Image: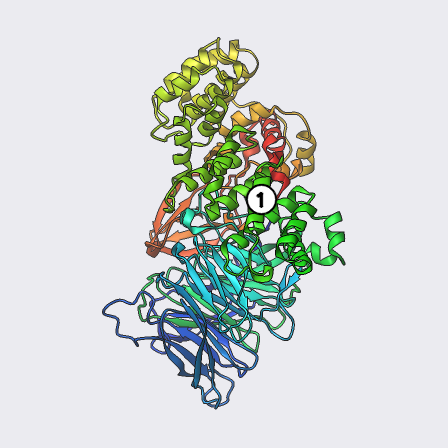
């Protein structure tokens, strides 16, 4: 990831707390000069969610009484909007009252500049006014309704944001006329229709979380962007650019901080499976046409606000308050994260609002229990008077004076710029020539691969919406089908894959055979292959959401398909879990007998990665087989590292009498497993990057580096990292690192792994009640069952009960171990750098379109 971590873990500042919850350990403030105060607790306020200040400086808070309400719950029958005001004019908010009540599954609240109050529930938006200013709403009008059969409380309507002043919100290069923005979650995939006050409707299905815009009175509803899981909170910065925080599918962390632009596709579709691992789902811009996140956030973010140039985020699941400093990254942004407040399991921040005096107030659900429980807190975080105001940067695109300049100079591969180009071109062409002619002219004007990808992606709104927002009534479906037919035949794999996504999403069954025919053409990489077979599976299926093991299931089916070529079988074998029930030793022996060298290679690699102890006998035979290619024997030798002591004699003989790669690999296995003394070499210090860059600037054997990457000894890279479909998923996927980073940056990451830590890979120091301290990276898991799983520095998993963690602090030390230059020789390092830097997969055709 591109964001750099900034932490001030030792700067614990003053904490003032009321005594109503003496059993709770107070949250810790981690930034100098900040002051945290508990301002209220039950019974004055319970299970609070969203909050907002009105023009008079009073705090309105959504108090939930209906969220998964237990049968024996004694609270009010409906949710309330509680009002905290100044009773005696001394400048202190000290009086609680009820502004409005009777809502079901209320989520959020926002206040307009004229004092109008908007309350968002799971299925509608209310506009409230207090005409006589007595602190009680005297009018309540439903201005937006969500018609759907879904009932789960917090995956319907939730996030809300109001435009301030007379400017429109900036949606990339388009400025919509909307004044109010709403977030809609995945809705469990149920069809829905959003109906505005003027009767205008926008419909959707498939569990695609979306952000909508409308006027203050609820009229003019339009879709702004989609592909979210649950955009629970939305905000605008001083330039009226839009940001949201998005909860994560169960197996695809982290939650996301996103820059929202008009027509943006953020990659998620619930009906493909809630785990988020289906090959047709993207979480960080992995698929053509989808947009990446700014960076990951803590678990279960429930609020995002812009304040003093920072984006502030509450993390319900990780018990903390974070802030993010934006950095320019192409036509969008990256960010640097700082943890400001860190609590324990009974600190569950939800809504957040900025007070007139600049303090941040936030609500606290307190308990991990989803059902309402009668506890709650309100906190105030006061920033130091001299706290710097950071002006949010402009993206690189915003620094240019014309779109033509942007396009010609900088952003022919930037996903945000390409999305802007597609939506702008389509809008302007439709306005000029009408829907059908405008769509055709836009497609014909697309000369670059990226332009085609994002135009194909934009057709999704014609195929889904009753009303395609700015594009007018979508009577262009026949033309859209022509475009998809053309795109499936395009020379670019990226354009073809974009068409596959749109066909699968809209379940256009007439294209099923066209999609299947792609398997008879060029397969540029693993991602393309998985997406195509995933689309075929989806088009053939009944629409049932897929489970988290969908990838292995699809690959196993391909391996059973005798009509597939050995090359496709090799590709499937590379990506499937080596311990899948279908990948038996007998099956691997059959693949090893294939005339295809590629299939043999993947069979040996899969054998080396299995956990079946009987694999070593077969690996030993392959290593000793002089009739096998040296490449296959070397892979088998690397696999023997997991049982080297039992094969020491064979490894020694191969190291002393073998040739080339065989001798080199055997000697390396003996050395990495401490069966042979390490080489004595003069090396620069780990922090002498110029020295290392000079030493590793050239040379190295990529094939040897690949074997080292997957060797189960020494650095053991594949325990945490994946490369071209093989390996672990604890750390970043390194498949395309050669295209994303310079050789020097790769060297730096190996030698100094803690120098830059992306937010999604933030480790934690955990002090438990038995006096022990643990360092680990939080692993994905669905829900919150009171247990937390982490990966340690060896890539091994450990699990703790939340209640046994006395203290948790963000660490500035990566779980990737330092000192790898002491484990590996200079030749090893050259090999691994050559492998990562010279990766052919990094320049595959699908990369020509973001």
Residue 733 in sight = yes
Query: Residue 507's spot in the image, x, y percent?
Result: 45, 46
Query: Residue 566's spot in the image, x, y percent?
Result: 47, 22
Residue 408 vs 17, above or below: the answer is above
Along the horizontal axis of the image, is 455 left or right of 86? right
Image quadrant of residue 449? Answer: top right
For image coordinates 23% across by 70% down, the residue present is: 72
Residue 199 vs 819, above or below: the answer is below
Along the horizontal axis of the image, is 351 left or right of 412? left
> How many labels, in total?
1
Give the class, few, some or many, for how many residues have Cα within 10 Å of label 1's Cα (few <14, many ≥20): few
- Residue with the mark numbered 1: 482
For image coordinates 45% across by 16% down, the residue present is: 594
Along the horizontal axis of the image, is 761 left or right of 448? left
Residue 717 in sight = no
Of residues 360 and 150, the one nearer the viewer is: 150
Of residues 396 and 497, the one nearer the viewer is: 497
Residue 129 vs 654, above or below: the answer is below
For image coordinates 70% across by 32% down, the residue present is: 694
Image quadrant of residue 428? Answer: bottom right
Query: Residue 399's spot in the image, x, y percent?
Result: 73, 58
Of residues 509 and 470, the one nearer the viewer is: 509
Image quadrant of residue 691? Answer: top right
Query: Residue 555's spot in the image, x, y percent?
Result: 42, 32
Label 1, secondary structure: give it.
helix
For image coordinates 41% across by 13% down, the residue present is: 621
């Amino acid at each position: 990831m591109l964001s750099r971590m900034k932490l001030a873990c030792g700067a614990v500042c003053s904490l003032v707390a009321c005594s109503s919850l003496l059993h709770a350990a107070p949250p810790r403030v981690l930034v100098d000069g900040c002051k945290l105060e508990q301002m209220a607790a039950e019974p004055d306020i319970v299970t609070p969610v969203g909050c907002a200040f009105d023009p008079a400086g009073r705090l309105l808070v959504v108090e939930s009484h209906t969220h998964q309400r237990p049968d024996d719950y004694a609270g009010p029958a409906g949710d309330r909007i509680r009002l905290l005001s100044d009773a005696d004019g001394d400048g202190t908010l000290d009086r609680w009252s009820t502004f409005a009540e009777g809502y079901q599954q209320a989520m959020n609240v926002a206040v307009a500049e004229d004092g109008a109050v908007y309350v968002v529930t799971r299925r509608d938006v209310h506009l409230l006014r207090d005409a006589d200013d007595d602190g009680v709403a005297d009018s309540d009008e439903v201005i937006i309704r969500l018609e759907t059969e879904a009932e789960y409380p917090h995956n319907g309507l939730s996030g809300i944001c109001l435009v301030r002043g007379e400017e429109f919100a900036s949606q990339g290069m388009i400025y919509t006329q909307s004044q109010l923005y709403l977030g809609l979650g995945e809705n469990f995939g149920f069809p829905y229709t959003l109906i505005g006050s003027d009767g205008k409707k926008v419909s959707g299905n498939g569990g695609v979380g979306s952000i909508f815009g409308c006027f203050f009175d609820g009229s003019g509803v339009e879709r702004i962007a989609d592909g979210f899981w649950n955009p629970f909170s939305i905000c605008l910065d001083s330039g009226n650019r839009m940001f949201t925080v998005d909860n994560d599918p169960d197996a695809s962390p982290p939650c996301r901080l996103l820059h929202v632009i008009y027509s943006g596709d953020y990659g998620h579709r619930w009906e493909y499976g809630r785990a988020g691992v289906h090959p047709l789902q993207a979480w960080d811009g992995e698929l053509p046409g989808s947009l990446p996140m700014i960076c990951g956030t803590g678990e279960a973010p429930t609020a995002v606000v812009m304040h003093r140039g920072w984006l502030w985020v509450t993390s319900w699941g990780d018990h903390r308050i974070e802030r993010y400093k934006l950095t320019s990254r192409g036509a969008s942004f990256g960010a640097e994260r700082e943890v400001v407040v860190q609590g324990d399991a009974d600190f569950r921040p939800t809504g957040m609002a900025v007070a007139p005096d600049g303090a941040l107030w936030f609500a606290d659900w307190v308990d991990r229990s989803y059902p309402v429980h009668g506890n709650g807190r309100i906190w105030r975080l006061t920033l130091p008077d001299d706290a710097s105001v950071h002006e949010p940067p402009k993206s690189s695109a915003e620094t240019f004076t014309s779109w033509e300049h942007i396009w010609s100079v900088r952003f022919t591969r930037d996903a945000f710029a390409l999305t802007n180009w597609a939506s702008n071109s389509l809008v302007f062409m439709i306005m000029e020539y009408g829907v059908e002619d405008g769509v055709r002219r836009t497609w014909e004007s697309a000369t670059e691969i990226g332009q085609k990808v994002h135009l194909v992606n934009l057709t999704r709104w014609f195929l889904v919406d009753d009303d395609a927002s700015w594009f007018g009534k979508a009577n262009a479906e026949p033309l859209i089908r022509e475009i998809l037919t053309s795109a499936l035949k395009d020379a670019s794999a990226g354009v073809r894959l974009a068409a596959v996504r749109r066909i699968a999403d809209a379940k256009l069954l007439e294209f099923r055979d066209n999609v299947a025919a792609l398997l008879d053409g060029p397969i540029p990489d693993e991602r393309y292959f998985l997406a195509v077979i995933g689309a075929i599976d989806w088009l053939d299926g009944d629409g049932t959401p897929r489970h988290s093991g969908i990838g292995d299931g699809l690959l196993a089916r391909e391996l059973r398909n005798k009509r597939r070529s050995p090359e496709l079988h090799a590709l499937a074998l590379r990506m499937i879990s080596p311990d899948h029930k279908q990948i038996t030793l007998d099956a691997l022996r059959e693949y090893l007998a294939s005339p295809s060298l590629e299939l043999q290679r993947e069979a040996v690699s899969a054998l080396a990665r299995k956990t079946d102890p009987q694999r070593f006998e077969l690996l030993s035979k392959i290593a000793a087989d002089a009739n096998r290619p040296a490449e296959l024997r070397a892979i088998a030798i690397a696999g023997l590292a997991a049982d080297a002591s039992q094969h020491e004699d064979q490894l020694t003989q191969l190291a002393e009498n073998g040739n080339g790669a065989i001798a080199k690999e055997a000697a390396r296995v003996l050395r990495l497993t401490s069966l042979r003394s390490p080489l004595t070499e003069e090396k620069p210090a780990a922090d002498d990057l110029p020295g290392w860059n000079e030493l590793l600037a050239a040379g190295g054997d990529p094939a040897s580096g690949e074997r080292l990457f997957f060797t189960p000894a020494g650095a053991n890279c594949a325990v945490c990292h994946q490369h071209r479909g093989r390996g672990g998923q604890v750390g970043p996927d390194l498949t395309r690192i050669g295209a994303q980073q310079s050789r020097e940056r790769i060297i730096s990451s190996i030698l100094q792994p803690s120098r830059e830590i992306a937010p999604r890979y933030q480790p934690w120091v955990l002090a438990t009640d038995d006096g022990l301290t643990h360092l680990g990276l939080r692993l994905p898991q669905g829900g919150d069952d009171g247990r937390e799983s982490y990966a340690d520095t060896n890539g091994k998993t450990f699990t703790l009960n939340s209640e046994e963690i006395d203290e948790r602090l963000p660490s500035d030390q990566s779980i990737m171990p330092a000192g790898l230059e002491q484990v590996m020789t200079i030749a090893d390092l050259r090999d691994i750098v050559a492998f990562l830097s010279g990766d052919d997969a990094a320049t595959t055709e699908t990369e020509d379109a973001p």
